[in-house]
Image (cartoon, rainbow, N blue to C red):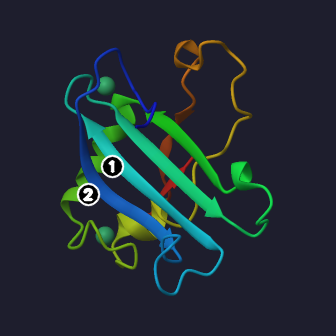
Amino acid sequence: MTTARCCESPALSWLAKLAARGVPHGHAGHDVVHDYTVLSRCGACGGGVVEHHSHDCWDPGDHSSWSMYWWWRVDPADMDAVLELAAACPAPSDPECDCRLHRGLGAETPPRAAPSRETPYERAPVPSAKVRVGTDGLPRWA
Ligand SMILES: [Zn+2]
Ligand SMILES: [Zn+2]
């Protein structure tokens, strides 16, 4: 279950796995860190959602610090460029893909704001991420 939402009744469909690092906890080869970033589009509002999961079990005594989760809403206006880039991507599920979508938006996560203290959390303002395409043709989070 995630709390990710872009509008009142999101209809999210998976667009791309933008980035990944490490293997999941409990799997062979897991070495402390497992991060990944996923991009979805919303059929209801035309916006999008970016989710970043970060796992780090460096401190075995503090399980609560192992898994962190951030997410952002992307405005419908910014999704036009994103969808265009996603349509041109030959391998949406491959974080190592060399297309402009992956090289640009997979390079880093959107800027992180402090977690909201609003209660219930679901009512809190949704952090949003903007997309700007640079002169080099690569999209960047803003
Ligand atoms: Zn929506
Ligand atoms: Zn790609």
Is 54 left or right of 85, judged from the image as shown?
right
Q: Position of residue 72 (x, y in %)?
A: 51, 37
Q: Which residue does the image show at 80% across and 61% down from the upper left?
A: 61
Work out whether residue 64 can be spotted.
yes
Judged from the image, the quadrant occupied by ligand 2 is bottom left
Disc 1 and disc 2 in contact, CB within 8 angstroms: yes
Q: Position of residue 141 (x, y in %)?
A: 54, 49
Name the residue that disc number 2 marks.
Answer: 86
Work out whether residue 137 can be spotted.
no
Is 93 left or right of 27, judged from the image as shown?
left
Q: Which residue does the image show at 26% across and 52% down from the upper left?
A: 15
Is 84 left or right of 32, judged from the image as shown?
left
Asked whether 127 or 116 is in front, the reply is: 116
Q: Which residue does the image show at 53% across and 54% down from the upper left?
A: 53
Alpha carbon separation for disc pair 1 and 2: 6 Å
Q: Compared with residue 33, is residue 138 higher up or lower down, i.e. above or below?
A: above
Q: How many marks?
A: 2
The quadrant of the image that shows the N terminus is top left
Looking at the image, the residue that sits furthest to the bottom is 29
Disc 2 residue lies near ligand 2 with CB under 8 A: yes
Q: Position of residue 56 (x, y in %)?
A: 67, 65
Disc 1 residue lies near ligand 2 with CB under 8 A: no
Q: Which residue does the image show at 75% across and 70% down from the upper left?
A: 58
Label 1, residues with CA under 10 Å away: few <14, some 14-19, many ≥20: many
Q: Position of residue 89 (x, y in %)?
A: 24, 67
Asked whether 26 or 89 is in front, the reply is: 26
Name the residue that disc number 1 marks.
Answer: 82
* Element type at mark 2: helix
* Element type at mark 1: helix
Asked whether 142 or 108 is in front, the reply is: 108
**What's the residue type where badge 2 is placed?**
Ala
